[in-house]
Image: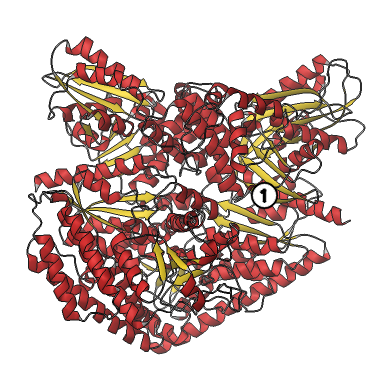
Amino acid sequence: MYKVGIDVGSTTIKCVVLDETHNIVYKSYRRHRAMIKEKVTELVQMIQNDILQGETASLALTGSASLGLAEYFKIPFVQEVVATQIAVEQYPETVDVVIELGGEDAKILFLTNGVEVRMNGTCAGGTGAFIDQMAVLLDVSVEEMDKLALRAERIYPIASRCGVFAKTDVQPLLNQGASKEDVAASIFHAVVNQTIGGLAQGRELKGKMMFLGGPLTFLKGLQKSFVEVLQLDQNTGIFPENAQYYVAYGAALYAANEQPSDFAALTQQMQIAGELKQYDSELPALFSTQEEYEQFRQRHERAVIPEGKLEGYTGKVTIGIDAGSTTVKLVVVGEQDEILFRKYMLSNGKPVELVRETLQEIYQTNPQLHIIGSAATGYGEELVKNAFSLDDGLVETVAHLTAAQKMMPEVDFIIDIGGQDMKCFKIRNHVIDTIFLNEACSSGCGSFISTFATALGYSVKDFAALGLFAKHPVDLGSRCTVFMNSSVKQAQKEGAEIEDISAGLSISVVKNALYKVIRATTAESLGKHIIVQGGTFLNDAILRAFEQEVGVEVIRPNLAGLMGAYGAALYARALDLEQSQILDAAGLEHFYHETTERVCQLCGNHCKLTVNQFNNNRELIAGNRCERPIKSQDKNFVNITYNAYRYKREQILKRKSEKGKRGRIGLPMGLNLYENYHFWHPILTKLGYEVVRAPFGSRELFLEGQATIPSDTVCYPAKMMHGSVMHLIQKQGINKIFYPCMPYNFDEKISGNHYNCPVVAYYPEVLSANMTALQEVRFMKNYLGPHNEKHFVAKLAEAFQQDHVTRKEAKEAAALGYQQQEAYLKDLKRYGKEAIQYARQHHLPIIVLAGRPYHVDPEINHGIDQLITSYGAVVISEDCLPLASSRFYTKVLNQWTYHARLYNAAHYISQQEDMYLVQMVSFGCGLDAITTDEVRDILEENGKLYTQIKIDEINNLGAVKIRLRSLFAAINQKKRAKG
Amino acid sequence: MAKLEYDKNGRLMFTKEMKEEYTILVPMMLPIHFSMLRAIFQYEGYHMEVLETQNSNIIQMGLKYCHNDICYPAQLTIGQLMDALQSGKYDKHKVAVMLSQTGGGCRASNYVSLLRKALQKAGLEYVPVVSINFSGLEDNPGFVITKNMIYKMANAVIYGDLLMCLHNQTMPYEKEPGASQYLVDHFTKMLNQDFSKGESMGPRAIRKKMDEIVSAFAKVPVHKKDKVRVGIVGEIYVKFAPLGNNNLEAFLLKENAEPVVPGLLDFLLYTIDTGIEDYIRYGGKLIKPVITGYLLKLFGGIQKDMIKAIEKAGCFHAPSSFSRTKELAKGVIDYGVKMGEGWLLTAEMMALIDEGVNNIVCTQPFGCLPNHVCGRGMMRRIKTMHPDANIVAIDYDASATRVNQENRLKLMLATARRQHQTV
């Protein structure tokens, strides 16, 4: 009897056939392009005809994508991890750990010392599919990407948490001219980090490790990354032959215990079964008839930007370039604001070359062209502007507004969905009022559809068109694209057709924009005059889905994808120059572009800079978090002296500790300790300890503790604590660590209760349960409540009983602690007063960068405070404001101290002409889902702008810069509007 | 018609007239328990309806009216209420909505405020929101919970736990399909009638009733009880509500497993217990731990009666008592962890293992903060103490797909079966 195992993953089908004596007589590996039933039917039929030839065989399916088939046709099914386990047990040597990466799942099996199995959570996203997406982004095949990676020289930090994050890191690297070799290797490193951080979850990876699954079989670069990071050698790292077939092999072994299947009957059943239509969708079709579609198309064909001819044009023209994350758009605009030339290109990671070629094309078409202005916008604005000596650059929101107002002067809402980002803004009194940008987690809007299409073997256009007449669009939810991937898998399992999936994806993109980014509830709340633009809206299915969802007929300019570039060109005309300084034909002829790397020494962040060199000694620095390395060369740069975040860091650095009679004690740095340091440091010092503080956060510090993090969706500040504690033990030689649990904060009399959030309150518990290193040291995670001083003293004495601290000592130490904590908070208010005075004297905007005490950490805030000062504003924080200790009525339950400060600050700022609130929100902070809405409400009820910045591991400040520059543009516009 | 009256902060109150005229809508969590709670309120003169809707519009409403990053239970409960309000089934001017509020440090304390924001967004700000809480967060002249009601409610919860426990142990093995569900329905009806009568039962009467229930279940003809037993713990809503956990119990039954679900009373006792633990850690007025101790003893006593009743039958596994459960968490997690499900979640995992149930599904809403600590955060320690523990953490969310959840559950079940065979 033969045994057949078929493994259906998210992208591929693997099949193994074993004979009587368990020899492999057949194996195959192929992509299924979402046509699972057809491909499995083909396979079963082929086995029946060519291999079995009358003999009997038993069959087992495995892999998440085959669940539906197995249930429907009653075929034996084995969970894929179990199949892997069965297969590995056949391996001649004892294997301790198996790491298996599949299309979308990642798994670790610990086989010795307590069998344990881990699969990636719903958030960590795919790996194989992720690598595919990245290859598309690099414009190479996966094989080429692998070869590139082997030649890499340096590794860039790329967020390893989920695919979408990584993508947001990769795109700018490419745009900044980092080499594909390095980016490719960095992507593989990110995959490794994801596996360690997301999967191992506190359990150490050691012993003999076997690597399985498609990507780990085919990709030598990925193998190399694993070997390097896990420090494996030939003995400990096992990359078996046929690694991609292991799961199918395990399924075949599993089948050995099953009854023989009737392959002939099964083939027949599968062929006549037709489609497995089981899923229920309540989403309406995009178009039910061809006529409906025609009407829709005709209506939209009316929104036209005038066009003219470039050849022989003698008037004065301007050039606008929109270098987006995945596309480059370039227009030439004539005196009547008509477009004389336009081009829309996929950037494929080389925007500069594309712009150069296009400019050459323009100069050839019209050698006499009189260019009076040129401007760039978009992610690659700086690069393009510097490369070609453009006259100016502008933030993309302003570019889009300029173009939209040309089309429809009364426009009050613009939504732009590009390849990588989504921008929406409301316009009030012709000024940008509220900006919505997609957070790092839900980006990938347009480019998601394109990579998805490519993965399924379609062009974007064909794929989107498929959905137009789909009868039952699949409901894919409205969260991040990684979720969409598994939603698609679910739909496939339930027999959804490719048409329904395509339509469903379009609807998802729209829902994502409306409910996740804009958070709209009704169509009226968006506006009456809506313009949609950006390349993604060129897709009729998405446009239709949008209109259906908001219930308003919107305007899509015929050149919706070019609005940014058009706006830039219009802006360039408004510069009112005689002659543009853009490179001429001769300049383009001798154009060269070279990139080198160096490390910035201007502050402790030590950014890795990419320096782009162009001819005429022009250069552009990229990779910087703040503008200092650029502006330090600029004479007009004013160095703003007031930055409360820097001041707070300095206050921490100032505290010194002498050798004490009770020895050394370690304090981790992070979460509430950023503020309470001024409480604990004096207390511990007074008690006679030498306080050893862990360093501020950094990428390296995070990596030190990464392997001990049990929950991959907890916030980055909490994750950093693992590194902080590890560093104290391993690098600073500490054997006594103090990190108390604090469900209650100080009672500042500004809220109903004075809680800390659950993570801040109890994180010491998590560390204690997950870091084996803590078993070697004394870890003091005592429960201490500072809100009740008398009781606190008793508990403090109890906590240090072991070191013979007396009640009297505790009392004195506590008194000092309370006094110093209060003095610190008072000093912040003094600093705030000074900063505000300074700003008002110099007419500078005041940005209240609000968040939590731990957002002071330079790694957690990624240098946003410095970025803001470099734009010429004074930065203070919510606790610097001159607020009396009082409590405002809030619509939400106000019982967390840090939140109450935010609400109070928002109330105060809403009465101040020159103050703007920018709120930093850590990804995964559940409580901020509540505070952000409330803070926004408070500000907007008073006609103030609200800006929110979501931060995580992500190292890229692109989206942050757009937000901040848009904010400053809006501030200036408002100023001007007032006269 | 009842006038709309507001408190000094502008909060719309539930007035005495409203009590007469309005229907209070409540989102469903536990069908058996909630039907009895409704009967208690009915007796007190409230018109109350527990929503049994399950349609997909619920989550759509939740996503539309709540912040998309807020926890899944908020989206579902608020979604269920909004769906009902807009269904056309109710006179919007004669209906109120109710949610519970613990006042703890978990963001769930804010559901009531979020519901109010949702109503405002939908133009339904005239619908009063009733917060059911025992910490004096919000009060309403037309909604007063008396001591007698609290006592009866605790009894209802105990009966609910008992019926759920017996049903879970009988239903997978019954020879005649539907036999145990019939008993559940029968007793729920009977108890509802008791609760509609007003006077609360004394301990002796309760013990008698529990014996009656247990022996009725013991008489149901069953096959040999040899299925894999799987415990369910987690965030309170997704742990219990089928709407929240994609019908987890039904799935486990279909996969030939026996679900073991620690009861609701433990959660209530845990909430009460906080009074003592807080006093120990942070001081305060002595009266708090005194009252707390009294309540714990009172309700803990009824729970112990229930356990005795189950043990007496000799054919059922009795759940661990609250005090035993608490004892088991010692040295694993501190009793100071009191936000969300806090130490209780960890303790329930320990108790399940202690009862011989090594297979555990830890359900949690995606991104649930307390769960980072007491769920996922403690698994490593539990696994170290009990290497055989087979725990799977499942995230629930509007966009988390069933196929991914079921695939992980199947893995847990496969591991469970392997262990089951070797035993």
**Residue located farthest toward the front when viewing the structure as drawn:** B1
Per the image, label 1 sits on a secondary structure element best described as: helix
Q: Is residue B15 visible?
A: no
Query: Is B22 in front, or is A377?
Result: B22
Left-right relation of B70 to A524: left
Left-right relation of A678 to A97: right
- Residue A532 lies, with reference to residue B100, above or below; the image says above
Query: Is B341 in front, or is B200?
Result: B200
Image coordinates of residue B50 in percent, x first then y, are 38, 62
Q: Badge 1 local density, few (<14 within 10 Å), some, or many (20+)? A: few
Left-right relation of A262 to A642: left
Q: Label 1 sits on what residue type?
A: Glu
Question: What subunit carries mark 1?
Answer: A
Quadrant location of residue A418? Answer: top right
Quadrant location of residue B417? Answer: top left
Image coordinates of residue A823 in percent, x first then y, are 60, 79
- Residue A943 lies, with reference to residue B303, above or below; the image says above
Image coordinates of residue B38 in percent, x first then y, are 35, 68
Quadrant location of residue A596? Answer: top right
Task: Name the residue at 22% across, 10% down.
Answer: A49
Numbered circles on residues, count? 1
Mark 1, residue position: A524
Image coordinates of residue B150 in percent, x first then y, are 33, 78
Query: Is B36 in front, or is A125?
Result: B36
Q: Is residue A640 visible?
A: yes
Task: Name the residue at 79% across, 35% down.
Answer: A407
Q: How is the image coloured?
A: secondary structure
Task: Name the residue at 36% across, 88% down.
Answer: B287
Left-right relation of A431 to A39: right
- Residue A45 lies, with reference to residue A36, above or below; the image says above
Query: Is A906 in front, or is A855?
Result: A906
